[in-house]
Amino acid sequence: MKDRIVDKLRQYRDLSDAQLRELIKSPAHDEALMQAADAVRREWYGDKVYLRGLIEFTSYCKQNCLYCGLRAGNKRAQRYRLSEEEILACCEEGYRLGYRTFVLQGGEDPYYTDEMICGITAAIKERFPDCAVTLSIGEKPRESYERYYRAGADRYLLRHETADPVHYARLHPDNMSMENRRRCLRDLKEIGYQVGAGFMVGSPYQTTECLLADLRFLQELQPDMIGIGPFISHKETPFKDEKNGTAELTLRLLSILRLMFPYVLLPSTTALGTIHPSGRELGLKAGANVVMPNLSPVQVRDKYAIYDNKICTGEESAQCRGCLERRIESAGYRAVTDRGDVRRAKSAVKMEE
Ligand code: SAM
Ligand code: SF4
Ligand code: FES
């Protein structure tokens, strides 16, 4: 289907602010966007879908983000921590299932000192030298990021959450700042990590202007990975009565991101699978090329409750593996067993005036 704006975005990887606003707001371009995004992901990554084994190793968090069920202020949250041995056992199972990237994610939990994080990272790299280790443990001083990198961590996921300062302040308590979040992302890039940024879709107070700012911020940062998923309310947070983000807008943004950043690693997230029964399959069709199956031990899964009704909390890792394989195939793609590093960005074609 011919669509002038979509064709232009595909060609130049960029548009004017007015044209981007139009794409974000209007469903009229959705079909053309999805087709173009799928064509571009196939040019860059074929039909491959990369698997990342997600180990949610601590549900303790000292922060108080207003949207998140793990926030320190949620006194009803069930908290747990995994030991190094338990984490390694998850990796063992993940390796058997064909995963070659392990993502260690958790709340900001001071129980895990830098030394412990380095020890766990080094132990995984020693036992599984052909695997990548991704950390996603929040905001830290540069020196900590440097230590984890020296211990062998390859990648770091830290969503910027929103690039609009007023919106940022409405989602976070006063002790958190957009400046520090950005400082972290800059440090991580300079140190040499493959870096993932991203944001929630449909978070409270988010406007089209916020999303436009997110896209412009990502152009500046040039991350290797971009994680987006719908906001889903959690009943024990200040946002308990807020509306969830939609699958429709999340899919539209996935396609826009694929066209703006053809090389990027783009997950089809669990949150998307939570708000729509075939959300993850649709995410792949809209341009995503990564899925992050849960590898955490089944007995702790429902305790990592970032939002309500999260899927995959009752299933064993092997069940999720089989289920995902079928879903990926039904969408017309192929799950692959390799590290799936980013294909380096070729610079964008300059846009005509
Ligand atoms: N603590 C680390 C951090 O904040 O970067 C990593 C864990 S945190 C739970 C991972 C991501 O979950 C956040 O970056 C946020 O975008 C997402 N998240 C938190 N609450 C959410 C909610 N209610 N709905 C959807 N996503 C949410
Ligand atoms: Fe903690 Fe991350 Fe949740 Fe914020 S989003 S409360 S830092 S786990
Ligand atoms: Fe976990 Fe389907 S992917 S049960």
Image (spheres, helix red, strand yellow):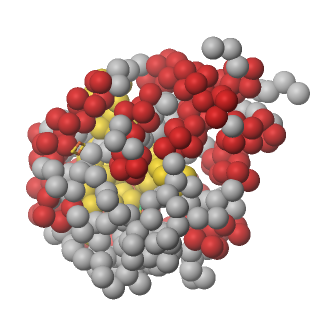
- The answer to whether residue 328 is seen in the rendering is yes
Using residue 240 as the reference point, say whether residue 301 is left or right of it: left
Residue under the point 23% across and 29% down: 326
Using residue 70 as the reference point, say whether residue 216 is left or right of it: right
Residue under the point 49% across and 71% down: 241
Using residue 345 as the reference point, say whether residue 231 is left or right of it: left
Q: Nearer the viewer, residue 208 or 265?
A: 208
Q: How many marks?
A: 0
Q: Quadrant of ligand 3?
A: top left
Image coordinates of residue 103 in percent, x first then y, are 31, 52
Q: Nearer the viewer, residue 253 or 196?
A: 253
- The answer to whether residue 349 is seen in the rendering is no
Residue under the point 56% across and 60% down: 203
**The N terminus lies in quadrant:** top right
Q: Nearer the viewer, residue 33 or 160?
A: 33
* Residue 15 vertical placement versus 76 (above, below): above
Image coordinates of residue 342 in percent, x first then y, are 45, 35
Residue furthest toward the top? 1
Image coordinates of residue 345 in percent, x first then y, are 57, 32
* Residue 182 vertical placement versus 349 (above, below): below
Looking at the rendering, which quadrant does residue 132 occupy?
top left
**The C terminus lies in quadrant:** top right
Residue under the point 68% across and 25% down: 6
Image coordinates of residue 25 in percent, x first then y, are 69, 42
